Image (tube, rainbow, N blue to C red):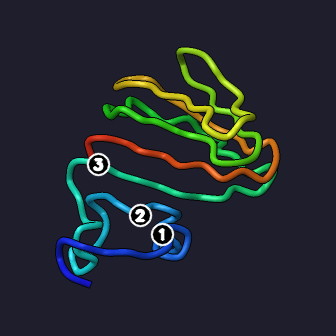
């Protein structure tokens, strides 16, 4: 691995960071995966997995895209159940959210900027 190039498997490489593959919280020793501008997550949620608490005043833009499964995202602006690969939900700063996997679901999440 070099500082500016890497190949791997998202599920394996994100296994120690709750699925997060790219972001400010990735150790700089991981090279290009350590980023301040964007966060990327790949995760397979088992059916019934949910985030019972809501986020609070998040100031980032978030995109959640369904790879496979049936996954619901609830936001303070509305909700959406994603059932087809490629379905997505996107929201901006100040919108709180929660989610639930209605069946085994793989989702790709991108947030920017990467911040605590």
**At 74% across and 45% down in the image, what residue appears?**
101
Q: Can residue 115 be seen in this view?
A: no
Count of picture labels: 3
Earlier sequence position, callout 2 versus callout 1: 1
Q: Name the residue under label 3.
A: 38
**At 49% across and 46% down in the image, what residue appears?**
109
Question: How far from the left and from the top, in percent, is residue 19?
Answer: 51, 63
Question: How far from the left and from the top, in percent, is residue 21?
Answer: 41, 64
> Does residue 111 lie above or below 11 as drawn?
above
The answer to whether residue 68 is left or right of residue 4 is: right
For the residues labelled 3 and 2, the Cα–Cα distance comes to 10 Å
Badge 3 crowding class, 10 Å Cα cut-off, few under 14, some 14 to 19, many 20 or more, is some
Q: Name the residue under label 2.
A: 21
**Mark 2 and 1 residues: CB-CB less than 8 Å, in contact?**
yes
**Mark 3 and 1 residues: CB-CB less than 8 Å, in contact?**
no
For residue 62, which quarter of the picture? Answer: top left
Question: How far from the left and from the top, in percent, is residue 45?
Answer: 69, 55
**At 38% across and 29% down in the image, what residue appears?**
57
Question: In the structure shown, which secondary structural element does the residue marked by tag 3 occupy?
Answer: loop
Q: Name the residue under label 1.
A: 14
């Amino acid at each position: 691995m070099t500082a500016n190039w890497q190949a791997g498997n998202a599920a394996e490489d994100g296994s120690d960071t709750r699925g997060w593959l790219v972001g400010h919280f990735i150790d700089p020793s991981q090279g290009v995966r350590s980023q301040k501008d964007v966060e990327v997550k790949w995760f397979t949620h088992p059916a019934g997995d949910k985030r019972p608490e809501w986020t609070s005043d998040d100031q980032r833009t978030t995109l959640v895209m369904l790879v496979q499964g049936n996954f619901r995202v609830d936001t303070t602006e509305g909700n959406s159940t994603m059932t087809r690969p490629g379905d997505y939900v996107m929201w901006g700063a100040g919108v709180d959210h929660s989610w639930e996997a209605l069946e085994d679901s793989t989702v790709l999440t991108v947030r920017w900027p990467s911040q605590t």
